[in-house]
Image (cartoon, grey):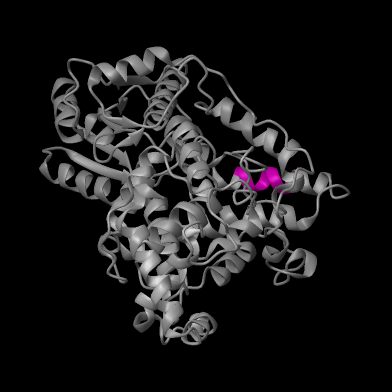
Amino acid sequence: MAKKVKKLRLILGDQLNHQHSWFQEKQDDTIYVLMEMRQETDYTVHHIQKVVGFFLAMRNFAEYLTNRQHEVIYYHINDKENNQTLAENLKQLIKKNDIEKFEYQLPDEYRLDQQLKEICKSLSIDSEAYDTEHFLTTRNDLEKFYDGKKQMTMEYFYRDMRKKYDIMMATKNDPEGGKWNFDKSNRKKWTGIPEIPHERGFRKDVSHLVKEIEQAGIKTMGNINEKSFNWPSSREDSLSVLNYFCKNLLVHFGDFQDALHTDHAYLFHSRLSFCMNTKMLSPKEVIDSAISYYYEHKDKIDISQVEGFVRQILGWREYMRGIYWLKMPGYRRRNKLDNQNELPPFYWDGKTKMNCLHHAITQSLDNAYAHHIQRLMITGNYALLTQCHPDEVDAWYLGIYIDAIEWVEITNTRGMSQFADGGIVATKPYISSGSYINKMSNYCKNCHYKVSKKTENDACPFNSLYWNFLDDKKEFFKNNQRMNMMMSLLEKKDAKEISKIKERAALIIKNPIDF
């Protein structure tokens, strides 16, 4: 009989996968370790709700394993034996417990992937890495799929994934409903009807955890109601949010997924991204649950509602992860538009007379959440139009949102939002004047500025910033066919109008706190 090898298995804070094969059988020779570390809280300034959310979910997962008789070592943030770095903690545990083999699941962040490789090289024992058993693709599937193709258009990858997993397919090659994509049906403005159900909340008292974080001296941003924490932090919580979404929100999700409103932070959005990015839920079970509910209620739910939801997970989420592993580490240094400005101070307090930015930022500070259009077309749009350095934008997005982990944040921010990758993710920059914001929201209604005005003192700042950006970057976009129409309109503006636009834009960029 072969001698049992005593193993130490690392579980990172975003690897809380209850369904992983590691945990299906109790193994007497295996110790699992989870750690709250300053290494992870300090690489950027995180939202207080993000730190609380991760610590609470990790603690719940450790309890889950312990209750199933797995041997677990858990380092709390203020434990004396916690050295606060992955390398020091692992070496200490390996020595103390006479570990003969170290095992870990492949991290989703490049920095941790590199760090763990270096740690394993330094160990005098065997080590082995395992898949997280979460994603529907491997790290290098995207590279294989786009090999030999000029552009990495997400739509074709999404169609291939639909076929591969037989998701909403009428035949082997034909989609249900006769179309692959119902995006044109997903752009409605919400004006008060239909009624929006309240989000599935939890109201947890996390004051003890907030106190621990404060005692540790961790610097955070944002606000928290420590007596009523509202995010899912367990497998049970996560399944509850998923079921609530299917039963109450899916019916109108697609229609209003791009809508914005001052009175509603969540509208019909699921709030499942934190559950998935910590791996408490798998993308496949989320997709399957939504589709099953749709099939059972086809008389009430249109296909455009569920397709818009599936596309975000099966398409964008897997695609962005593939881009990350294909283009890192160089991707995090990309700044193709050579933007150099600092992010305005109001990104940290929401104090601006621009109603759209005030609401999107204040909501983010209060809830550690904003949906994709708020991130892309409000905060991201303004940062790009004012030509902020993508490093600054990255750090803000990575810190402020509870679901932000670098693999998904940096591709959406540096690629989709800031066009810093020069067109790898998006074929054109996602920018707009105030007209788009007015079309999709009620933000402009009570704003200090007038969306109809261009360069006057009370004109919407987005209007002059938009045309100034196009003028400043016209050399870069001159060969971009998708920008032809806007560049043509820019050329038709006379010198006097351009001068007024640039004067107004320069004032906004130079003195953001005045706006």
Q: Is residue 240 above or below residue 453?
A: above
123 or 253: nearer the eye?
253
From the viewer's side, name the closer residue of 506 and 4.
506
Tell me: residue 222, above or below residue 499.
Answer: above
Residue 445 position, x and y percent, is: 64, 49
Does any portion of residue 361 appear in the rendered image?
yes
Question: The magenta stretch spans which residues?
Answer: 285-292
Residue 115, position as x, y percentages in the image: 20, 45
**Was residue 230 drawn as part of the magenta stretch in this picture?**
no
The quadrant holding residue 123 is top left
Q: Position of residue 84 (x, y in %)?
A: 19, 28
Query: Which residue does the image show at 42% across and 75% down from the upper left?
Result: 470
* Residue 136 percent coordinates (x, y): 52, 54
With respect to residue 227, does 457 lie above or below? Answer: below
- Nearer the observer, 351 or 175: 351
Residue 75 showing in the rendered view: no
Name the magenta segment's main secondary structure: helix
Judged left or right of residue 426, residue 82 is: left
Instruction: Name which residue lies at 63% across and 43% down.
Output: 269
Quarter of the image with the N terminus in it: top left
Whether residue 100 sits left or right of residue 289 in the image: it is left
Q: Residue at x 47, y 37 (%)?
A: 362
Compared across the picture, whether 52 is left or right of 444 comes to left
